Amino acid sequence: MIYNVALTTLAVWRTGPASLVGDGASRWNEAIFARHSVRTYDGTPLAPDDASSLAGLRPERLGAARVRHVLIQGDRALERIMRGLVGSYGRIAGAPALVALIAQKSDSGHAPALGYLGQQVVLEAVSRGLSTCWVAGAFRRAAVGEFAELAEGEEVLCISPVGRPAETTGLRRLHDASLKWITPGYGKRKPLEEIVRGEVRAPWLQAALEAARWAPSAVNLQPWRFRVDESGGVAIECPAGPDSKQALDCGIAMANFAVAARAHGAPGAWELR
Ligand SMILES: Cc1cc2nc3c(=O)[nH]c(=O)nc-3n(C[C@H](O)[C@H](O)[C@H](O)COP(=O)(O)O)c2cc1C
């Protein structure tokens, strides 16, 4: 039985007019299914257009928590931020740029808000033909501060490399392949029946849940659950508190859900509980 852990309702979906994330929900909707984590890059610097679009993106907010992203470019930054992690899980190589995802940790709801914001940046990158990889583990948080000014109380919770994938050979290929054995359900997702309670009738809702299902999560744990009530109302549930790592993952799934709902003609927005 999958519902053997206590779940907390994190947010409810309110249908109605909403500001559209990005300039095209359908472009981002396609990116949801094209995206997968890439850990080895070919080093090609970002095109100026891509860099300015990512740096200047104004993602839609989830709640009032202060979260933001900063694009950092250049080999030196990458070397400083990624140094000393040779051989560790999820080591990133060759990326010409990274996005730092920053939150005011004392703000309630910062975790889902950062997931929601970061995934929009990821979808923008992927829709421009770039690759990404959410990383919460192996990077030197303090070094990010050398390239992005951090305000009092701000912390870099995650980063994502951005760039073009490289062919992998030798040890690098072994490293990337090893993730298949240490990540549960690598490349797969739990079936909808396992993550959704209630009857799904509307086609837009089916599409939005499918998009949420394919969201990335730390160690592919997919902690999100959805509850659909009699009247078709949707809530997202999380097995841990609103500022947990799982809530950050849920924020990522909520972004996918919102993008797909809007791409299927059902505007609305999440309201945090
Ligand atoms: C919040 C978060 C943190 C992650 N941290 C790491 C990490 O530290 N190292 C890594 O190699 N992958 C990390 N990942 C990537 C996940 O392992 C990956 O998204 C998941 O296995 C699903 O695979 P996919 O992204 O290719 O669909 C992280 C993903 C998320 C969402």
Image: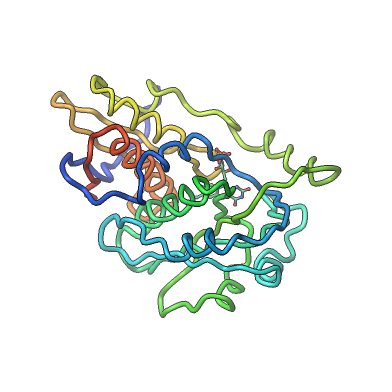
Relative to 210, residue 114 above or below: below
In the rendered image, the residue lying farthest to the left is 231
The image's colouring method is rainbow
Depth check: give the residue in front, 10 or 70: 70
Relative to 113, residue 228 above or below: above
Q: Position of residue 46 (x, y in %)?
A: 61, 60
Q: Position of residue 147 (x, y in %)?
A: 57, 76
What residue do we see at 59% from left, 78% from top?
Answer: 146
Quadrant assignment, res 174: top right
What residue do we see at 46% from left, 47% from top?
Answer: 123
Q: Quadrant of the N terminus?
A: top left
Instruction: Answer with left or right where residue 255 lies relative to residue 178.
Output: left
Relative to 271, residue 75 above or below: below
Instruction: Answer with left or right where residue 62 lies relative to residue 176.
Output: left
Quadrant assignment, res 199: top left
Q: Position of residue 88 (x, y in %)?
A: 72, 53
Q: Total of numbered circles in the picture? A: 0
Relative to 169, residue 137 above or below: below
Ligand 1, by image quadrant, is top right
Quadrant assignment, res 117: bottom left
In the rendered image, the residue lying farthest to the right is 170
Instruction: Answer with left or right where residue 252 lies relative to residue 144.
Output: left
What residue do we see at 33% from left, 52% from top?
Answer: 242
